[in-house]
Image (cartoon, rainbow, N blue to C red):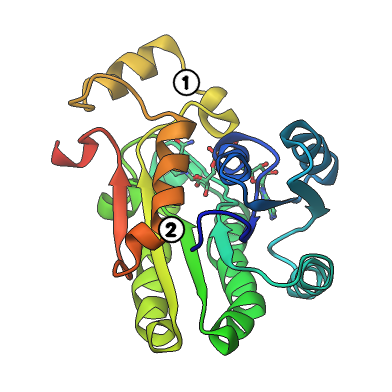
Amino acid sequence: MSATGRVVLVTGAARGIGRCIAQAFAGKGHVAVVTDLDAAGARSTAAALGGAAHAYGMDVRDAAQVADVVARVVHEHGAIDVLVNNAGRMTQGGFAATSHADFGAMLDVNVVGIFNCVQAISPAMMARRRGAIVNIASVSSVRGGGAVGNVWYGATKAAVVAMTSGLARELGPHGVRVNAISPGVVETGMVSEFMTPAVRDRVLTRFPLGRLATVDDVARTALFLASDDAAFVTGQTVAVDGGFLTN
Ligand SMILES: NC(=O)c1ccc[n+]([C@@H]2O[C@H](COP(=O)([O-])OP(=O)(O)OC[C@H]3O[C@@H](n4cnc5c(N)ncnc54)[C@H](O)[C@@H]3O)[C@@H](O)[C@H]2O)c1
């Protein structure tokens, strides 16, 4: 990726990690395409990021809507150079705490959502022989939950890791790199409702670096993986977890 001017589409970018990733790319002179199910939130995020950011309402579960937004972005900005598959849902608690409907909803966003975005965006990347995809997985992918997300969430994130490796193998010969980031616990809206002081204290004991992850930790890694500094890095899942997975 050149130093500036790339078009970077981030899903689920109205808030949390996605918002910070969009901000990081905009701050480096790239065009940040802020997409989210929450269209109003995407608009306010893009407005806050300034002229280099543009908002689109986009539900990653809806293949037709994804294709429509991608066509509009390409028409308005020329191409999509970087795709960050960040949109996600999580359930927590013991295995019985997740209903069939909740598991389906997680699969739809965390797995089918990436399918829809990759299918819509990667053909043009391959044709141009240029592109980078960064998927947001989770440390929960390794042992099936165990951080704050549960086993079913971990299973959807393990699928993200598998997609990252398989897509890297297929897209690599066409000049497109695919990597993932597995963040440790980040205090965003996704976890805030059950992050009591007791839960925070329990989780913190498993972070050798002595703190939880920040949205900036994740965004800096996304910038690296999308950049030419990572030109020979593909198919990898980078844990940004302060050593959580060593425990
Ligand atoms: N917060 C954590 O501790 C943590 C840890 C590891 C991985 N992750 C992953 O990081 C990613 C971002 O999480 P976050 O903590 O910022 O969450 P968040 O809940 O703060 O933000 C998620 C965003 O995704 C959007 N979204 C949800 N469903 C969508 C859909 N169908 N289409 C488009 N957008 C949709 C939401 O509107 C929201 O803006 C997720 O994939 C999550 O699983 C989070």
Asked whether 98 or 61 is in front, the reply is 61
Q: Nearer the viewer, mark 2 or mark 1?
A: 2
Asked whether 119 or 46 is in front, the reply is 46
Give the mark, 2 or 1, whose residue is nearer the N terminus: 1
Circle 1: residue type: Met
Residue depicted at x 60% and y 39% = 27
Residue depicted at x 25% and y 51% = 143
Circle 2: residue type: Ser
**In-image side of 34 versus 5 (left or right):** right
- Tell me if mark 2 has few (under 14), some (14-19) or many (20+) residues whose alpha carbon lies within 10 angstroms of its own: some
Quadrant location, the C terminus: top left
Q: Residue furthest left?
A: 246
**In-image side of 117 versus 78 (left or right):** left
Image spot of residue 190 (x, y percent): 56, 34
Residue depicted at x 34% and y 83% = 169
Residue depicted at x 47% and y 59% = 135
Mark 2 and mark 1: Cα distance apart in space: 34 Å
Vertical relation: 154 (above or below) 122: above
Would you say residue 199 is visible in this rendering? yes
The verdict on label 1 being within 8 Å of ligand 1 is no
Residue on which the image places disc 1: 195
- Tell me if mark 1 has few (under 14), some (14-19) or many (20+) residues whose alpha carbon lies within 10 angstroms of its own: some
Vertical relation: 56 (above or below) 228: above
Would you say residue 149 is visible in this rendering? no
Assign a secondary structure to mark 2: loop
Among the 4 quarters of the image, the one containing residue 103? bottom right
Asked whether 173 or 4 is in front, the reply is 4
Ligand 1's quadrant: top right
The dot on residue 227 is 2
Image spot of residue 226 (x, y percent): 45, 59
